[in-house]
Amino acid sequence: MTRRIAFWLVFAILCGGTSAWAEDEPARLLQVGAEETEQAIVQIGGRMCEYRRSEVEDALRRFDAVRQVQFLNNHGTVLVRFLGSGVRPERLAQAVERALIMGWGCKAWVDEGAGLAAGAG
């Protein structure tokens, strides 16, 4: 009887602890300094350039300040959350454009009209 209780106790601790951690992980990563976290929209244009997601994500993840890369649609709109003191949004767009240099007329730029406020998260 004692072994059965011990088994279920260990099982409950392991299952409960793992799922709680996994659910909180994305929020924890963005709370590194919520007041310092900024976001920008990087637009990608050119022939088939918006479908080269792995190159785009790799280019953005090279920056230590980048916390999250999220593709908002299939038309080259990328939301980037980053520490504002670590990098300027224009540098993010330049890195994406360099990563897509082998594409047909690939361009990347910061969408200034996106209306994203600094510190929003």
Image (spheres, rainbow, N blue to C red):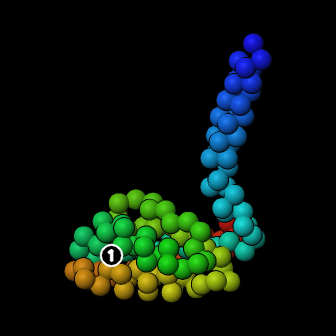
Vertical position of residue 4 compared to residue 108: above or below = above
Question: Percent from the top left, x then y, of residue 72?
Answer: 45, 60
Vertical position of residue 47 compared to residue 94: above or below = above
Tell me the residue at 70%/40% (across/down).
17
For the N terminus, the image quarter is top right
Q: Is residue 61 visible?
A: yes
Front-lying residue, 63 or 80: 63
Q: Is residue 102 shown left or right of residue 61?
A: left
Question: Percent from the top left, x then y, of residue 4?
Answer: 71, 18
Going by the numbered disc 1, the residue's amino acid type is: Gly
Quadrant in which residue 121 is drawn = bottom right
Tell me the residue at 58%/85% (across/down).
88
Q: Secondary structure at mark 1?
A: strand
Tell me the residue at 56%/65% (across/down).
68
Tell me the residue at 41%/80% (across/down).
96
Q: Is residue 13 shown left or right of residue 106?
A: right
Question: Percent from the top left, x then y, of residue 38?
Answer: 64, 73
Q: Is residue 113 visible?
A: no
Q: Mark 1 highlights which residue?
A: 45
